[in-house]
Amino acid sequence: MAIKKHGSAEWQGGLKDGKGSISTQSGALDSYPYGFKQRFEGVKGSNPEELIGAAHASCFSMALSMILGEEGFTADHIKTTAEVTLEEVKDGFAVTASHLTLEAKVPGVDQATFKKLANKAKEGCPISKLLVAKITLEASLKE
């Protein structure tokens, strides 16, 4: 079985003075603005790195939920943030890392088991497998 989803982008103009919009198949984003100023200067709108971060965080959270369930646990709450690093390298720019920060409340699980299952989710998440960047994880279990 293959599931196919799509996102799209449109662009007009040059790199620094141009502007673009992104849309998703679901309609969650519909012609949402992105551009150089949003990416590098903090102007309101979106950029590829935050979209990758949202995709990685959401994918990881779902993978962790599945892995917890396989072990007989159900999370009351999972919150994941993915900090994606864009750096200038010798041949241009590259996404070089994605750091996951996880806070979760999972009744009945101990810290050692939680960390083991979180790392399993980090390795098994389909978006983690897509990214070639260094992916790190900081996980904290809430009481």
Image: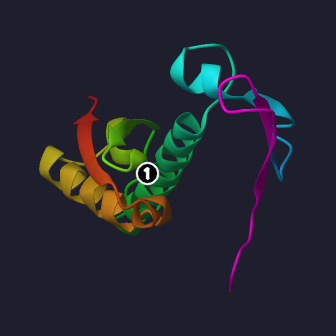
| Residue 25 in the image, given as x and y percentages of width and height | 83, 53
Viewer-closest of 4 and 93: 93
Viewer-closest of 34 and 25: 34
- In percent of the image, x 48 and y 66: which residue is there? 126
- In percent of the image, x 63 and y 13: which residue is there? 43
| Residue 59 in the image, given as x and y percentages of width and height | 52, 54
Mark 1 neighbour class, 10 Å CA radius: few under 14, some 14 to 19, many 20 or more: some
Q: Residue furthest bottom?
A: 1
Q: Which residue is mark 1?
A: 74
Image vertical order of residue 100 relative to residue 46, above or below: below
Image vertical order of residue 111 relative to residue 32, above or below: below
| Residue 95 in the image, given as x and y percentages of width and height | 40, 46
Q: Which residues are magenta?
A: 1-22
Q: How many marks?
A: 1
Horizontal side, residue 42 vs residue 112: left or right: right
Quadrant housing residue 14:
top right
- In percent of the image, x 74 and y 71: which residue is there? 4
Horizontal side, residue 118 vs residue 20: left or right: left
Q: Quadrant of the N terminus?
A: bottom right
Residue 11 in magenta stretch: yes
Residue 17 in view in this figure: yes
Q: Quadrant of the C terminus?
A: top left
- In percent of the image, x 25 and y 48: which residue is there? 109
Viewer-closest of 91 and 123: 91
Quadrant housing residue 104:
top left
Image vertical order of residue 120 relative to residue 19, above or below: below
Horizontal side, residue 99 vs residue 15: left or right: left
Residue 105 in view in this figure: no
Horizontal side, residue 116 vs residue 12: left or right: left
| Residue 120 in the image, given as x and y percentages of width and height | 29, 63
In what element is the residue under mark 1? loop
Question: What type is the residue that disc 1 sits on?
Answer: Thr
